[in-house]
């Protein structure tokens, strides 16, 4: 399993086990950076300075921290949300 959508705290566990998922993520990151830096005519963008790239990355990392904080809040699970054994 490459991504976690349950209540596990470590969302990065096994992230590189699925090669297709890894390739899609790498291509997406590269294309987004190229579009921002060089897509001025096609996408009406302008390149970001170093501090703006840092702010963008910090906002993305902040969403991961926000997810961890939300997982710390204990709420009763519905029956369909409870963990079930993996089907082979």
Image (tube, rainbow, N blue to C red):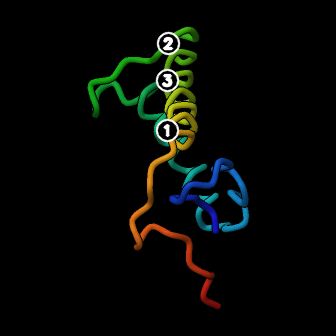
Q: Position of residue 35 (x, y in %)?
A: 42, 34
* Residue lying at 53% horizontally and 18% vertically, measured from the top left: 53
Tag 1 secondary structure:
helix
Q: How many marks?
A: 3
Tag 2 secondary structure:
helix
Residue tagged by mark 2?
A: 52
Q: Quadrant of residue 72?
A: top right
Which of discs 1 and 2 lies nearer the camera? The answer is 1
Disc nearer the start of the sequence (1/3) = 3
Q: Is residue 41 left or right of residue 57?
A: left
Tag 3 secondary structure:
helix
* Residue lying at 63% horizontally and 63% vertically, measured from the top left: 2
Residue tagged by mark 3?
A: 59
Q: Position of residue 11 (x, y in %)?
A: 63, 50
Label 3: how many residues lie within 10 Å, few (<14), some (14-19) or many (20+)? few
What's the distance in space between the residues labelled 1 and 2, CA to CA?
27 Å
Disc nearer the start of the sequence (1/2) = 2
What's the distance in space between the residues labelled 1 and 3, CA to CA?
16 Å
- Residue in the foreground of this view, choosing between 88 and 69: 69
Q: Quadrant of residue 50?
A: top right
What's the distance in space between the residues labelled 3 and 2, CA to CA?
11 Å
Quarter of the C terminus within the rendering: bottom right
Label 2: how many residues lie within 10 Å, few (<14), some (14-19) or many (20+)? few
Residue tagged by mark 1?
A: 70
Q: Position of residue 47 (x, y in %)?
A: 44, 18
């Amino acid at each position: 399993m490459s991504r976690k959508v349950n209540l596990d705290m470590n969302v990065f566990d096994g992230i590189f086990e699925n090669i297709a998922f890894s390739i899609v993520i790498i291509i997406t990151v590269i294309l987004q950076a190229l579009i921002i830096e060089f897509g001025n005519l096609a996408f009406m963008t302008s390149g970001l300075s170093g501090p703006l790239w840092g702010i963008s990355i910090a906002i993305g990392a902040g969403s991961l921290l926000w997810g961890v904080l939300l997982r710390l809040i204990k709420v009763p699970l519905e029956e369909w949300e409870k963990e079930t054994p993996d089907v082979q």
